[in-house]
Image (cartoon, rainbow, N blue to C red):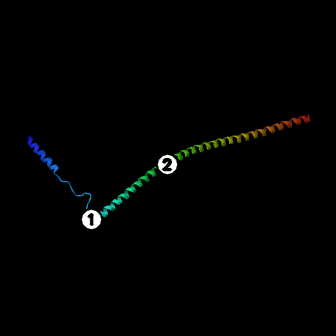
Amino acid sequence: MKNVLLIVFLVISFVGFSQTKITEDTNFVCLPKNIAKKVLSDLNELDRVKKQLFLFEKETYQLELKINKQDSTIMDLTKKDENNKIIISSVEEKYKLVEEDNKDLRKEIKRLNTRNTIVEIVSGAILTAITFIQIYK
């Protein structure tokens, strides 16, 4: 049994070591000229497309950065707009209050003018009456 295994092992190993090396250069491939030209043009096209893809990705990245900057600018301007609206509404409210106070003061002035006129008329009448009484007494 040992001999049989030894013989089988030797036969298998001799078959493995007895294979000859390939002496042909596998880097050299024979192609017709028209196919070789097409392969070269395809390879050139591939290189050009790779460069375009790189440029496209770079442009896309730059555009994304620009969009992010513009979005932040838009958000800032939106906040400013909201603040300006709040300021405008408070100023409008202030002017409404001032206008209401002015109306009240105008009414007060008219009332005071009317009262002063009545007081002047009454005091003039009293003075006239006292003067008349003093003169004819």
Could you say which disc has been placed on residue 32 in the image? 1
Label 2, label 1: how many angstroms apart (C-alpha)? 55 Å
**Viewed as shown, does residue 64 lie left or right of 43?**
right
Give the residue at x 11% y 45%. 8
Give the residue at x 90% y 34%. 134
Q: Position of residue 129 (x, y in %)?
A: 86, 36
**Viewed as shown, does residue 129 lie left or right of 69?**
right
Give the residue at x 60% y 42%. 90
Vertical comparison of 67 with 130: above or below: below
> In which quadrant will I find the C terminus?
top right
**Dot 2: few (<14), some (14–19), or many (≥20) neighbours within 10 Å?**
few
> In which quadrant will I find the N terminus?
top left
Disc nearer the start of the sequence (2/1): 1
Vertical comparison of 67 with 116: above or below: below
Q: Secondary structure at mark 2?
A: helix
Give amino acid for label 2. Lys
Vertical comparison of 48 with 97: above or below: below
How many numbered discs?
2
Give the residue at x 69% y 42%. 102
Q: Position of residue 64 (x, y in %)?
A: 45, 50
**Viewed as shown, does residue 30 lie left or right of 88?**
left
Q: Position of residue 76 (x, y in %)?
A: 53, 46
Give amino acid for label 1. Pro
Q: Position of residue 33 (x, y in %)?
A: 29, 65
**Dot 1: few (<14), some (14–19), or many (≥20) neighbours within 10 Å?**
few
Q: Which residue is mark 2?
A: 69
Depth check: give the residue in front, 44 or 88: 44
Depth check: give the residue in front, 66 or 35: 35
